[in-house]
Amino acid sequence: MTVPPPLPGRQPPRPPEPPRTVGPDQARPRQLVPGVPSANDREMLQVTEQTRTYPCANCGDALVYDPAIGKLRSPSCGSTYPVLLDTSKALQLHPLGPTMNALYAQARSAAQVQVVDHEVVCQNCGGHTLFSGTLTATRCPYCNTPIQRTDVQVAPARLPIDGILPLRVGDEQARHNIEAWVNSRWFAPREFKKYRVLGSFSSVYLSYYSYDAEVTTDYSGARGTHRTRRDSDGNIETYTDWWPVSGRVHDSIRQLAESANTGLDSERVRELEPWPAEQAVTYTPEFVAGHLARTYDGDAAQVFEAQARPRIEGIIENTVRRDIGGDEQRVSRMNPVYQSIDFLYLLMPVWLLTVTFAGKPFQVFVNGVTGEVQGQRPWSAIKIASAIIAGLLLIGIAVYLYMQVRGG
């Protein structure tokens, strides 16, 4: 591991001071690059490194977003700052087809920032930090300063973030929920429950698309009606009469959330739903300060085709079956026509526990808004075998007692 070079003349940190609240119009730290951020801009942009930090005006330490109070807070002196929301902007849905076509055209004509491994130099300690893959926010491994990569978010061939669901579940509550979930896994190995030692636990904002769609579907099929009759032996049997049907239905899809990140347990991530997407606010990077964040792996069109469309078609089939009615339904043809498909690009918060057990990673997720826990766990062969043996013994004892009583 490369040791970061010491900064000349670096002074020891100031002792912690009593917490205080700093208003948005009070003094701000000086700019490293004169003339880049405005005088009223809190963030400190490191233009040469394409990163963003938020120094405290009181002690100079990097601010982090604290979900317990809904503000930025200095870990050193406890000063708090309100998150600066741009109330002049409202979340605006984008038409999927025209937006992606324009983006693809821009990508062909502009220099695209690739989402690849990118090394930056921490402006606080001089250490080198590697942003790997789609990671856009992390902490310096040497001095723990929160830093955000900005070149991906402003790249001409990348979708800008529309909104964010701010993290609401704090570290303490998330750990409590995780511990309760882990301890309730009766057949998990004892070693797995030592997740504090074996695993990594962090908050991360994942990329999502929220889709709205209007769909009209022509269909054909058959309606089945159950009837009963008595056969020649007097037994009652049930049979089904089938009648051909056809019709048209309309579905209005609202806020269908789909994850845009790979490398995760997609089934468990899906089980974190529902997401209160209607509570999303206009994106500001201050919400991400001190937390991990990932940009998208698949764009809005790719995720729609691979994930959203199959789910929508399942919704349409349920609508068709209700329209057919009867006791049973057969659907032989569906022809969905999309009048509109719109989307928002949102960041959703989760707490992620990754435990490597027996050489295999297991992921446990906590919904950063609702606190719901979903995840994987290994199974203990010893515990399962012990439970089977105990069950057999109980059955054997019950049979023995029954035979004794019967024999007596």
Image (cartoon, rainbow, N blue to C red):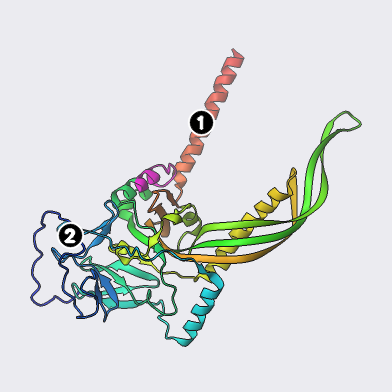
Give left or right: position of 51 versus 188: left
**Sequence-wise first label, 1 or 2:** 2
Q: Which residue is mark 2?
A: 22
Q: Residue at x 47, y 56 (%)?
A: 269
Q: Which residue is mark 1?
A: 393
Provide the secondary structure element on which disc 1 rests: helix
Give left or right: position of 316 versus 289: right
| Foreground pick, 397 / 14 | 14
Give the vertical position of 110 relative to 51 (above or below).
below
Callout 2 amino acid: Val
Callout 1 amino acid: Leu
Residue 216 rendering spot, x and y as whole percentages = 66, 61
Give left or right: position of 105 versus 243: left
Q: Are marks 1 and 2 in contact (CB under 8 Å)?
A: no
Between label 1 and label 2, give the one nearer the viewer. 2
- Name the outermost residue toward the top: 408
Mark 1 Cα within 10 Å, few/some/many (few <14, many 20+)? Answer: few
Magenta-drawn segment:
177-189
Q: Is residue 184 magenta?
A: yes
| Foreground pick, 210 / 151 | 210
Q: Is residue 353 visible?
A: no
